[in-house]
Image (tube, rainbow, N blue to C red):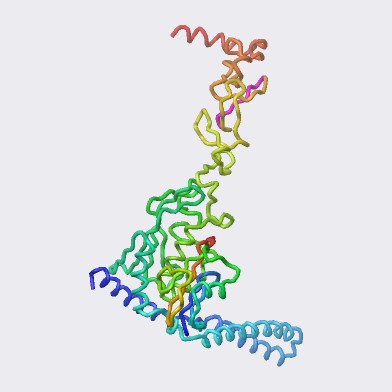
């Protein structure tokens, strides 16, 4: 037996041991115990209410008791059903099956790694292409020491091409290295708990290879979308404008176009001529020397707006005060 | 004869079932998934792909895994 098979054999024995331990913890009696404790509390209260002739309180408690009793019955039925099913050990793969699964993985995946020290089996998928978007290969990492936990595996992008709106999303159905299995959830759990590692890895790969748009963390159409600086909505490539002033991304609804030079502007860089009310970029508006209001070049004459030019008064006086002082420097 | 049948679609299923001698993998697929197409599934017998006319043997391990599973 070569080193690769020896490692697979050791791993299969350890995985089987871990799954066997998990098998003992399959039954959850806690819901039944909770419901039964509630029943006993209600029975005590109901007895007390009857003894003291509290008619309405007793009726209310009877209703509550009926509900809690039905909950108890449901919990009991669930336990009975699970107990009647075959011993989980019977459906649990043996270490020989797990060993064969580990060897078979090599025919299904580009790379397979067994790490005894970390108690992990990992496989590498081919590049995942969804609707023309290359998300690169993924590594599916199964940790057998965490097999009794809800999540005992991770899906890691090896050449990440994360979504722009949320960099933690490396695949429409993967967030922070966790796969949201959707329709495959129960099959994945059954395969994991039964020790059917080949099925488990195949199921995860097939979920990764398919795009289900309604349930995606980030839809593929919005994968490279950037939020509009003004309204926060995600902008697609076709719906995206860059502000000439600050280079921020703005959507078609929020973009303002300078009426003078046709440049795109965001709300922070756009100006409005105080006289003709035209929208203008920051390059095409200038403040009136006197009143500091913004105007287009057509509405300014000698750096002054029509109001300041015609009004004279304090503003005009102020200008006369300033000009000689500046000229003298 | 008894085989281990694993259906990885829907809720998942893995158990021993009885099949008639001479049943091919194609027959089994049509029995178990009559409204489905074989090309939409990864079909494995004893962890290997097989041809449609493969005759099932006692103790075979058969798995049907959908090629498209909708994540959430």
Residue A319 against residue A14 in the figure, above or below? above
Q: Residue at x 37, y 66 (%)?
A: A105
Q: Residue at x 37, y 77 (%)?
A: A97
Image x and y of residue A301, in percent = 61, 11
Image x and y of residue A222, in percent = 54, 46
Residue A89 falls inside the magenta stretch? no
- Which contiguous range is marked in magenta? A268-275
Residue A261 against residue A301 in the figure, above or below? below
Residue at the limit of the structure toward the bottom, as seen here: A51
- Give left or right: position of A4 versus A226: left
Image x and y of residue B10, in percent = 55, 70
**Which quadrant of the rendered structure holds the N terminus of chain A?**
bottom left
Q: Residue at x 55, y 47 (%)?
A: A221
Task: Name the residue nearer the viewer: B54 or A120.
Answer: B54
Task: Name the residue nearer the viewer: A12 or A176.
Answer: A12
Figure quadrant of residue A265: top right
Figure quadrant of residue A152: bottom left
Task: Name the residue nearer the viewer: A246 or A26.
Answer: A26
Residue A7 against residue A219 in the figure, above or below? below
- Give left or right: position of B35 versus A53: left
């Amino acid at each position: 037996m070569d080193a690769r098979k020896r490692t697979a054999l050791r791993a299969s024995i350890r995985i089987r041991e871990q799954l066997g331990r998990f098998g003992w913890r399959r039954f959850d009696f806690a819901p039944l115990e909770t419901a039964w404790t509630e029943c006993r509390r209600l029975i005590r209260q109901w007895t007390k209410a009857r003894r003291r002739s509290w008619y309405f309180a007793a009726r209310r408690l009877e209703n509550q008791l009926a509900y809690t009793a039905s909950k108890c019955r449901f919990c009991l039925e669930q336990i009975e059903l699970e107990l009647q099913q075959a011993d989980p050990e019977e459906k649990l793969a043996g270490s020989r099956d797990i060993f064969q699964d580990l060897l078979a993985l090599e025919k299904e995946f580009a790379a397979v790694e067994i790490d005894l020290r970390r108690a992990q089996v990992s496989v590498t998928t081919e590049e995942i292409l969804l609707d023309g978007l290359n998300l690169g290969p993924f590594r599916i990492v199964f940790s057998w020491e965490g097999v009794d936990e809800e999540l005992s595996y991770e899906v890691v992008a090896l050449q990440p091409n994360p979504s722009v709106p949320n960099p933690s999303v490396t695949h429409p159905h993967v967030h922070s290295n966790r796969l949201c299995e959707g329709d495959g959830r129960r099959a994945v759990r059954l395969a994991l708990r039964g020790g059917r590692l080949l099925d488990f890895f195949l199921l995860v790969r097939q979920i990764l290879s398919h795009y289900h748009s309604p349930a995606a963390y980030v839809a593929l159409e919005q994968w490279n979308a950037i939020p509009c600086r003004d309204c926060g909505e995600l902008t697609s490539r076709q719906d995206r404008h860059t502000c000439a002033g600050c280079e921020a991304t703005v959507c078609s609804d929020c973009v303002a176009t300078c009426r003078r030079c046709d440049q795109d502007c965001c709300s922070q860089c756009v100006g409005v001529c105080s006289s003709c009310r035209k929208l203008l970029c920051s390059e095409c508006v200038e403040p009136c020397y006197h009143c500091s209001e913004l105007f287009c070049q057509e509405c300014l004459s000698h750096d002054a707006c029509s109001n300041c030019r015609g009004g004279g008064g304090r503003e005009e006086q102020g200008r006369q005060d300033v000009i000689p002082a500046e000229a003298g420097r | 004869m008894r085989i281990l049948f694993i259906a990885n679609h829907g809720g998942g299923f893995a158990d021993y079932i009885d099949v008639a001698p001479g049943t091919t993998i194609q027959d089994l697929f049509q029995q178990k998934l009559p409204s489905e197409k074989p090309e939409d599934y990864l079909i494995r017998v004893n962890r290997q792909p097989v041809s449609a006319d493969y005759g099932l043997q006692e103790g075979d391990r058969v798995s049907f895994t959908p090629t498209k599973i909708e994540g959430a």
